[in-house]
Image (cartoon, rainbow, N blue to C red):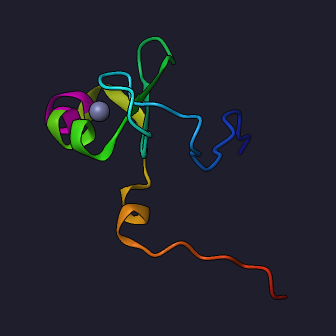
Amino acid sequence: MTTTTVTRELNALDRCDRCGAQAFVRAVLETSGGELFFCGHHARAVEEKLRPLTNEWQDETARLYEKPVYDDED
Ligand SMILES: [Zn+2]
């Protein structure tokens, strides 16, 4: 099995395509391979229609509800 797509964590530079807020969901379209980014709000708004058209739905919205973790021990 060969992995061709690299999944990375979304960061503050990733912006929702709809409203420009920080994106927490990355969707990869099945047809074009194009990437779409959504904030938590817009991800929920489009998920039902859009998700069946994607081959990847990277949902990091759970991070919205977590406190920031600073992992400087180790
Ligand atoms: Zn948005």
> x, y (%) of residue 61?
37, 56
Residue farthest bottom in this picture: 74
Q: Is residue 53 visible?
A: yes
Residue at left offset 61%, top offset 50% = 9
Q: Is residue 47 magenta?
A: yes
User: Front-most of 36 and 41?
Assistant: 41
Residue at 42% across / 46% down in the picture? 24
Q: Residue at x 24, y 28 (%)?
A: 50
Q: Main secondary structure of the magenta part?
A: helix
22 lies left or right of 52: right
Q: Which residues are magenta?
A: 46-50
* The quadrant where residue 44 appears: top left
Judge whether 51 appears above or below 10 on screen.
Answer: above
Q: Quadrant of residue 25?
A: top left
Instruction: Give x and y (percent) for residue 53.
Output: 29, 25
Which quadrant of the figure contains the N terminus? Answer: top right
Res. 57 in view: no
The quarter of the picture where the C terminus appears is: bottom right
The x and y percentages for residue 47 are: 21, 38
Q: Quadrant of ligand 1?
A: top left
Which residue: 30% across, 22% down?
18
Q: Is residue 7 above or below residue 37?
A: below
Identity of the residue furthest to the top in this view = 32
